[in-house]
Image: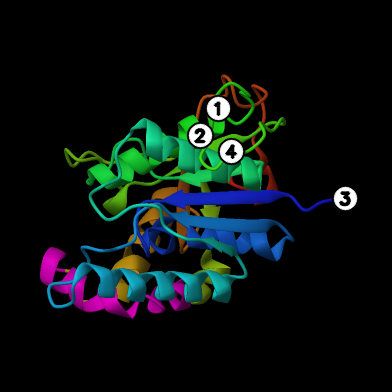
Amino acid sequence: MSKRRVFAIAAHPDDIEFVMAGTLLRLIDLGWEAHVLHVASGSCGSDRLDAGTIARRRSAEACAAAELAGAVYHPPLVADIEIFYERKLLAQVGALVREVAPEVVLTHAPSDYMEDHMNAGRLAVTAAFCRGMPNFPTDPPRHAVSGDVVIYHAQPHGNRDPLGDLVQPHFFVDVSSVIERKRAMLACHTSQREWLDVSQGMDSYLQTMQDLTAETGKLSGAFQYAEGWRRRLHYGCCAADADPLCVALNGLRTV
């Protein structure tokens, strides 16, 4: 029997570590096969290095983080700030979704502080929706695949939408047992500590992630550290009652 597969699709190197990595690690510990894709290369993530140099460095860091977790790494497709919801890029993401044929897709919140995040999420959703449509061509060409896929949206950065309103998850996954491994994955992204301090005022990169994960844990009312998830409506993707992520990880459901 083949392993159950989960595909985390995010915008930039280190996005998965901030809001998804604990859940991925717990699934991997249960024997799931995990795949990760950062749609963009991280090419704008430096005020010192040129785009090509920082993109290569960030890809190496993302690959190291995936290897540390035991996940399959897929190379980025475009440069930063070039994640648009358009045909060419959708065909590329669609090809990867068909190759992986995941049971679960993890992606960004529909409403987040950055357009790259939201567009990456939109691409992931449509690629999953079109997985079984033989008349939708992908790049490279891949045969349509059957089977349910359930899409889950992570918390937006800071647990708030772009207008500052708190986003309440549908359920919480306890990641307290893997918080140090989640932190170690994020620590692979050494180029980002300096950049996020300069660009966004994150003067303690690793601690910012841990504090946000603790804030989500506080929202749960039960866990020290948690990641929050919202399950996307099932139409076109899965059975109405399919909820493999919550079931596999004994998620604390709030709605």
Q: What amino acid is at disc 3?
A: Met
Residue 167 in the image: state x and y as whole percent.
32, 39
Q: How many marks?
A: 4
Let me know if residue 9 is in the magenta part: no
The residue range painted magenta reads 182-201
Which element carries disc 2, helix, strand or loop?
helix
Which-is-in-front pick, marks 4 and 1?
A: 4
Give neighbour class at mark 2: few <14, some 14-19, many 20+ (Cα, 10 Å).
many
In terms of depth relative to the viewer, which is nearer, 204 or 145? 145
Q: Are marks 4 and 3 in contact (CB under 8 Å)?
A: no
- Name the residue that disc number 1 marks: 130
- Mark pair 3, 2: CA separation: 25 Å
Label 3 element class: loop
Q: Amino acid at mark 2?
A: Ala
Pointer 4 local density, CA inside 10 Å: few below 14, some 14–19, many at least 20: few
Report the Cα–Cα distance between label 1 and label 2.
5 Å
Give the structural element (helix, strand or loop) at label 1. Answer: loop
Viewer can see residue 48: yes
- Residue identified by numbered label 3: 1
Q: What residue lies at 51% left-to-right and 40% top-to-bottom?
A: 139
Mark 4 or 3: in front is 4
Q: Earlier in the sequence, mark 3 or mark 1?
A: 3
Say if residue 221 shows up in the picture: no
Nearer the camera: disc 2 or disc 4? 4
x and y percentages locating residue 131 in the rendered image: 60, 31
Q: Is residue 189 magenta?
A: yes
**Contact (CB < 8 A) between labels 1 and 2?**
yes
Q: Is residue 102 left or right of residue 90?
A: right
User: Which of the two residues, 91 or 158, is positioned nearer the viewer here?
Assistant: 91
* Residue 127 marker: 2
Identify the residue position indicated by label 4 in the image.
141
